Image (tube, grey):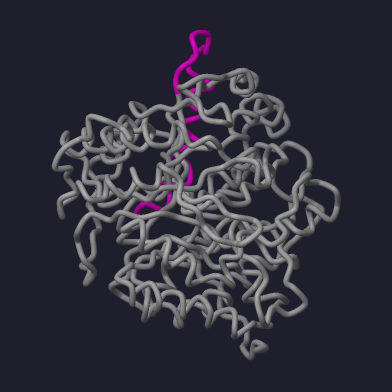
Amino acid sequence: MVKEQRVPCEQPKHRLQSLRHIGPTNCLTLALLNLSIACIDSGFRYDRPSTVNDQSATDATSRSDKPTGERKSNENSAFWWGVATSAYQVEDFGPGDVGEYQTDWDVHYQRGKLEHARGHGCWSYSQVERDLNALEALGVTHYRFSLEWARIEPAPGEYNEAALQHYVDLTKALRARGITPVLTIWHFTFPSWLYDADVDRHGWLHPMAAERWQAFLDYVVPRLTPHVQTFAPLNEPNAYALACLVNQFPPGGRLSYRRYLKTMDAEVARFIDAARVIRQYRPDARIISVQNIIDWQRAPLDLFDFWYRKGQEYNFYHLDQVADHCDWIGFNFYFAETASPLALLMQQQRDGDDVSDLGWKIAPGGFERRITELYQRYRKPLVITENGLADADDDQRARFLVEHITALQRAMAAGADVRGYFHWSLMDNYEWAHGYTMKFGLYEVDQATKALKPRASARVFKMLRGLFTPDGQLDRIPAVIP
């Protein structure tokens, strides 16, 4: 254990001074059901920091004249083909974990706020070779994974050197197998010491959050930049803020639209902090966003497009403010949804071939629309950082893959500059409030042996990889789905 020996660094001028699945994406629709209450509570207003861009919910074409900001890279420019995971969702405890570190999710479960505990995860911390073999078998070129802040810093200013070295070794092991690491620094979880039962002081809004985030970056980034070029500072900050709004993420509390915006503004500042530190240690680093994007559809009785505009605000409020700090625009896409306060009720009633096990509408056409919209809005290279579905029987995933990759190809043919695709997920994992009941993996996890067993859809995923040319085009679209 390494104890921090440092004086607090001077706060950058842009810092805020006031400081998946019922997880963030599924609870989106719950937010629409409750947002009117929250808006009344806040009067639609709160005093935003001066760093906030007031054009964050403008039309898709309003930012099309922005420069690309592309930086030179020494990494292979071929189309990226990968899968994604997150630390908390797949990792178990490992040697050297002091007192079996705790996250805010563990505290939330202990307080009786969650039905499902994370437990042992999927053993990815102790079964690294197993995961590397699975990645290699899929033929991926890139692997997106995340750090667990709580594991590395189990107490404020006290660092678990073995934990950080584990992640450094993982990046080296990936490269040794010809797989490029893409590192997410924060993926939804906080150390337990940033937990506060008062939702207005929890997580990114905790009084210690800004200073401890800076210290964490100063500790981990210089160790990782020799081995990692592409960094995603935050995972789905918009989804996290909304999940907090509707009490689906720790710690729970009253609805507040003001807090929803305040959380995203704090996330903007923390994103910029991370980008600055990463570039300090690696000037040629590639910074990408990981934004949750929904294909919002207008409801027939949505007067003045109120709910649709709220959906678009969800998509773009945070991203508009960090886009200038990104080299590529990364986004996660899962489904289309009607922008309506009744959306959750409709979702719960859905069944059939065009919806996932979560009732999410499968929408390859919406995927194509949003790719085009994002490229027109930012004029920067895009990368799909997550795309997948809950499908326990594995009877939809193959078609989902083919249809979404076909939609991706259409968007690229129309001019969108897309550099890569990551499927969610490598394996079935802990899907937040759903526990282990929702199956997103190309591999299933054998609970008795800890082995990963490939599903039939894993073969389709690998087949599609084999059809790509180096510039990201498909030689042909498969006519028959195995």
Quadrant (top left/top right/bottom left/bottom right) for the C terminus: top left
Which residue is pictured at 45% across the width and 22% down the height? 354
310 magenta-colored: yes
Depth check, front residue: 166 or 281? 166
Which residue is pictured at 36% across the width and 60% down the height? 137
Residue 176, placed above or below residue 108 = below
Depth check, front residue: 55 or 426? 426
Which residue is pictured at 37% across the width and 78% down the height? 227
108 displayed left or right of 468: right
Depth check, front residue: 173 or 244? 173
Counting from the top left corner in percent of width and height, residue 307 is at 53, 22
Main secondary structure of the magenta stretch: helix
Which residue is pictured at 61% across the width and 26% down the height? 32
Depth check, front residue: 119 or 72? 119
Q: Magenta segment, which residues?
A: 297-324
411 magenta-colored: no
Counting from the top left corner in percent of width and height, residue 461 is at 34, 46
